[in-house]
Image: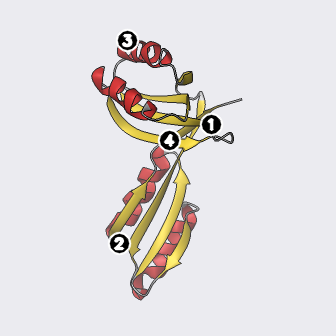
Amino acid sequence: MRHTISILVENKFGVLARIAGMFSGRGFNIDTLNVGPMLDGRFSRITATIIGDEDALDQVIKQVDKFINVLEVTAFSRGQATERELVILKVNAPAAKRSEIMQVCDIFRAKIIDVASESLNVEMTGNANKIKAFLDLIEPYGIVEMARTGNLALKRG
């Protein structure tokens, strides 16, 4: 089962390594992992999408919550959070195919952020399903390179 967890931590050396070690030690596969600073630079938010069962998830949350530098741990249930990913692609885009690629980008509200003679760099944000659908349609044109953030989430309301 796939779970999204948000962990508010102090910016201290080794915190991320200890948390990632806890997940792997409990048999979770980390599907995506993001870390970014908060407005107050003393803190960061770790967002992890992990694979594992409910019992192990509860145990991991209790263990992570015990770490000194962890301020808050939130496990999101389905529909409890707004979730987004960012993907940046370099796509083969010869002149004959460029307008088709641009139409696919328009449908998904993706932005073309760089144009070269034979390629386009495109950025797109959305939930995991939207990203997958976009990639499925763009892939036949030829994805040269891809960078993807993985999941970010904040609690609704």
Whichever of callouts 3 and 1 sits on the residue coming sooner in the sequence is 1
**Total marks in image:** 4
Question: For the residues marked 3 and 1, what is the alpha-carbon distance in whole angstroms?
Answer: 32 Å
- Badge 1 amino acid: Arg
Q: Which mark is residue 42?
A: 1
> Vertical placement of 92 versus 108: above or below?
below
Q: Which residue is denoted by mark 2 in the rendering? A: 141
Q: Which mark is residue 35?
A: 4
- Badge 4 amino acid: Val
Question: For the residues marked 1 and 2, what is the alpha-carbon distance in whole angstroms?
Answer: 44 Å
Whichever of callouts 2 and 4 sits on the residue coming sooner in the sequence is 4
Query: What element does badge 2 sit on?
Result: helix
Q: Between label 4 and label 3, give the one nearer the viewer.
A: 4
Query: What element does badge 3 sit on?
Result: helix
Q: Residue at x 40, y 62 (%)?
A: 137
Whichever of callouts 1 and 2 sits on the residue coming sooner in the sequence is 1
**3 and 1 marks in contact (CB < 8 Å):** no
Question: For the residues marked 2 and 4, what is the alpha-carbon distance in whole angstroms?
Answer: 32 Å
Q: Residue at x 45, y 31 (%)?
A: 15
Q: Between label 2 and label 3, give the one nearer the viewer.
A: 3
**2 and 3 marks in contact (CB < 8 Å):** no
Whichever of callouts 4 and 3 sits on the residue coming sooner in the sequence is 4
Q: Which residue is denoted by mark 3 in the rendering? A: 55
Category of crowding for the residue at label 4, using alpha-carbon neighbours closer than 10 angstroms: few (below 14), some (14–19), many (at least 20): some
Q: Is residue 66 left or right of residue 53?
A: right
Category of crowding for the residue at label 1, using alpha-carbon neighbours closer than 10 angstroms: few (below 14), some (14–19), many (at least 20): few
- Badge 2 amino acid: Tyr
- Badge 3 amino acid: Asp
**Residue 148 in which image quadrant:** bottom left
**Residue 79 in which image quadrant:** top right
**4 and 3 marks in contact (CB < 8 Å):** no
